[in-house]
Amino acid sequence: MEQSQICPAREQSWLARLTQACKLALMQKQYIYAAGIIGGLAAIFIVGWVFLKQDDAPQASGPDQNATAPTATDSTQDDLFPDFSLASLNGNTVTRDDLKGQVTLVRFMATTCSICAIENPTLNKLNADDSLDVRFVDINIAEPRDLVQDYVNEVGIKHDVLLDTDGAVTIQNGVLGTPTSYVLRADASVCRRHSGLYREADLLAEFESCG
């Protein structure tokens, strides 16, 4: 073979080098060596094809304003909401008994919760509606007070935000993700537990049925 028919090694790709080696092995009747090269190339192409198929598969995305968030739990209960005593951002201590007297929405939330961020404008709107005899309470899960305060100021939350600094109340209620919300009757019994996005129409219907 003339030298002009072969590219210098430094200018050849790894695939070209393997192909050239396979050709030389066949010319020299080194069939086992050639078969090994062909098998290796086949394995490389198969692995590459698998990765390309994975890249083409639909990818999960975070929730947005137009998305329908899945509901992990939506159940009716009659037990009293477990007793608790938590400090609020304004410095007051709030207990379960303080929630008695009116329908209350208790939402377990976090500043990093994207669905909570979608809910916030709805809760702010309903909280400002004087025709609703409903109290709104957020329970933040184990985040620093300053971080929570900055978040509340940024998104304009006006209702009580309680600090579950050690996560004990969260664990007590079996909360596994945010947002998890409870609609309480006036006697602080649980009327509804809901995990995931709470839409305005659904909240209004719950308030009416639990009042």
Image: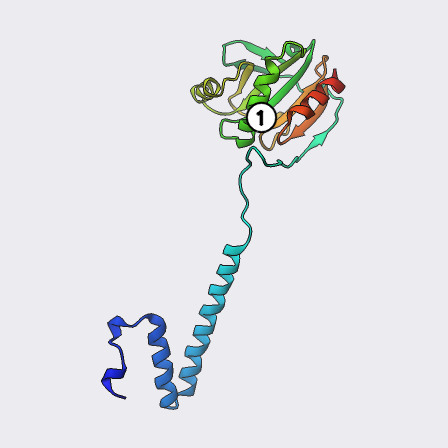
Which residue shows up at 57% across the image and 18% down it?
124
In the rendered image, residue 26, in percent from the top left (x then y), is placed at: 39, 87
For disc 1, the marked residue is: 119
In the rendered image, residue 155, in percent from the top left (x then y), is placed at: 49, 21
The quadrant of the rendering that contains the N terminus is bottom left
Which residue shows up at 65% across the image and 24% down it?
200
Name which quarter of the figure residue 19 lies in. Answer: bottom left
The quadrant of the rendering that contains the C terminus is top right
191 to the left or right of 34: right
Name the amino acid type tagged 1. Answer: Glu
Instruction: Tell me the crowding category of disc 1: few under 14, some 14 to 19, or many 20 or more residues within 10 angstroms, Cα based.
Output: some
Number of callouts: 1
Vertical relation: 103 (above or below) 114: above
In the rendered image, residue 76, in percent from the top left (x then y), is placed at: 75, 27
137 or 121: nearer the viewer = 121
Which residue shows up at 59% across the image and 29% down it?
179
Which residue shows up at 44% across the image and 82% down it?
35
106 to the left or right of 147: right
